[in-house]
Image (cartoon, grey):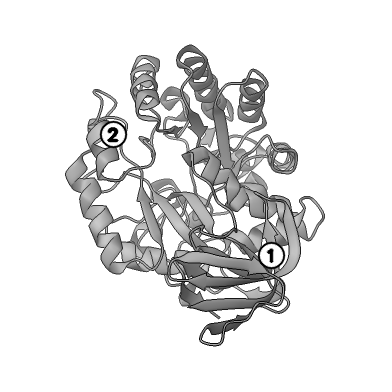
């Protein structure tokens, strides 16, 4: 039994913002109210802290199976717990690709044995994520996937996307797409613009993403299926999503902390600034922040993408795309969005909780009989992120040494304190 006392409960689902206590019995919330007591309960004093529904990361890479040099389910989820996440959705671009029930079951079983947080696998849309034939989607759903994606690359063709959407619609699964036009992307390593010319690096135009988003929205209009755009980074892409929402299509999208914090002007000869989609322009970043504030963007997701130091310690052109993100996501949201007055605290919590839950077709709220998954954080604690101290096996981040305002203080999963400062 666990009693969380003296916290400020923020619950976007019920619009609750009040000083309340939460009593947990077993894996469920037993009571929510003022001045609760329980003589035999462990007490967690949340004075001065925010108590929110458990954060969900809709987009991450745990690298297991097959890429354990960069990350494992155990190390990745330890980092997730430190960042306040109670559930993470891991992408299928592992070795082997998660395109079958046997691989899905392996991930689920490994997570049950080693992970402090919930791990919800995402299955491949196509066999081997090669874009040629549908993967075993129904079998993977029975084994535990919550969505499908060929992340790391787009679903290859509009025809295949139609097949995937129609099949997933019958299974009530969302389709998540990494949007890029490969013919425009070819060989690019950062956003096309003045900075790419200045650095002599091959640029990727923003239309690389928005053309593919437009295609996917058209297929969603054709099929009526659930479409989620991963790591949206441009104003043009957001305009497509906005129009789809206005038409009542079931289209959602996510933005990463690095895309609302950094721009292409921050890129230097340091592969920790190399990610896909690439860092965008100031105008694009401002559009993303507006979309986060006004509801056009549904989710903040980390796209946690660890890489072994040796693979990143090469010339910018040859380094893999991606950065880690679990341990800095909440703090960047508070530092870059809430404290400057761009977002309310309630809206930020929504983007980490009820937003991703809606994409998955589930609920996330603080109420009696609900799962006891909670994120407890300080909105004011100043701290400096040190990559060397991360729980992740990898250190590829542009935020090493950055001082942040706000931090996860405790993470509760199924009624257990799996992390506390």
Circles 1 and 2 in contact, beta carbons < 8 Å: no
Name the residue tied to disc 2: 129
Residue 242 position within the rendered picture, expressed as x and y whole percent measured from the top left: 66, 26
At 68% from the left and 37% from the top, the residue drawn is 284
**Crowd band around label 2 with a 10 angstrom C-alpha radius: few (<14), some (14–19), many (20+):** many
> Who is closer to the viewer here, 237 or 58?
58
> Who is closer to the viewer here, 225 or 33?
33
- Residue farthest bottom in this picture: 39
Residue 247 occupies quadrant: top right
Observer able to see residue 275? yes
Question: Mark on residue 38?
Answer: none
Residue 33 occupies quadrant: bottom right
Residue 355 position within the rendered picture, expressed as x and y whole percent measured from the top left: 59, 44
Labels 1, 2: front one:
1
Q: Residue 397 vs residue 62: left or right?
A: right
Name the residue tied to disc 1: 9
At 48% from the left and 61% from the top, the residue drawn is 86
Residue 160 position within the rendered picture, expressed as x and y whole percent measured from the top left: 33, 19
- Above or below: residue 137 compared with residue 85: above
């Amino acid at each position: 039994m666990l009693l969380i006392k003296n916290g400020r409960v923020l619950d976007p689902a019920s619009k609750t913002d009040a000083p309340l206590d939460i009593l947990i019995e077993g894996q469920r919330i037993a009571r929510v109210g003022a001045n609760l007591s329980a003589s035999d309960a462990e007490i967690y004093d949340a004075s001065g802290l925010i108590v929110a529904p458990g954060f969900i990361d809709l987009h991450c890479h745990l690298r297991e199976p097959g890429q354990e040099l960069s990350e494992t389910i155990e190390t990745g989820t330890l980092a997730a717990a430190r960042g306040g996440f109670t559930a993470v959705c891991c992408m299928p671009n592992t070795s082997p690709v998660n395109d079958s029930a046997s691989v899905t079951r392996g991930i689920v079983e490994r997570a049950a044995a080693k992970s402090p947080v919930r791990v919800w696998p995402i299955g491949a849309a196509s066999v081997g994520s090669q874009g040629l034939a549908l993967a075993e989607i129904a079998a993977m759903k029975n084994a535990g996937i919550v969505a499908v994606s060929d992340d790391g690359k787009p679903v290859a063709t509009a025809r295949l996307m139609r097949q995937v959407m129609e099949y997933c619609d019958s299974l009530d699964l969302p389709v998540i797409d990494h949007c890029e036009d490969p013919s425009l992307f070819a060989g690019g390593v950062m956003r096309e613009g003045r900075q790419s010319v200045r650095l002599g690096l091959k640029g990727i135009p923003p239309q690389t993403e928005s053309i593919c988003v437009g295609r996917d929205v058209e297929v969603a209009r054709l099929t009526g299926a659930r479409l989620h755009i991963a790591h949206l980074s441009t104003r043009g892409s957001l305009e497509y999503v906005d129009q789809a929402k206005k038409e009542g299509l079931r289209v959602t999208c996510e933005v990463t902390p690095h895309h609302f914090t950094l721009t292409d002007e921050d890129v230097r000869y340091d592969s920790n600034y190399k990610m896909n989609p690439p860092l965008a322009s100031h105008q694009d970043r401002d559009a993303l922040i507006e979309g986060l504030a006004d509801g056009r963007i549904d989710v903040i997701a980390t796209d946690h993408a660890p890489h072994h130091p040796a693979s990143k310690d090469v010339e910018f052109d040859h380094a893999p795309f991606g950065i880690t993100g679990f341990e800095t996501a909440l703090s960047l949201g508070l530092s870059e969005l809430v404290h400057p007055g761009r977002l309310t605290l309630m809206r930020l919590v929504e983007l980490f909780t009820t937003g991703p839950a809606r994409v998955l077709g589930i609920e996330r709220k603080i109420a009696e009989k609900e799962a006891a998954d909670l994120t407890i954080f300080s909105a004011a604690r100043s701290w400096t992120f040190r990559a060397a101290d991360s729980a992740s096996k990898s250190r590829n981040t542009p935020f090493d040494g950055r001082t942040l305002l706000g931090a996860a203080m405790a993470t509760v999963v199924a009624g257990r304190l799996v992390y506390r400062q």
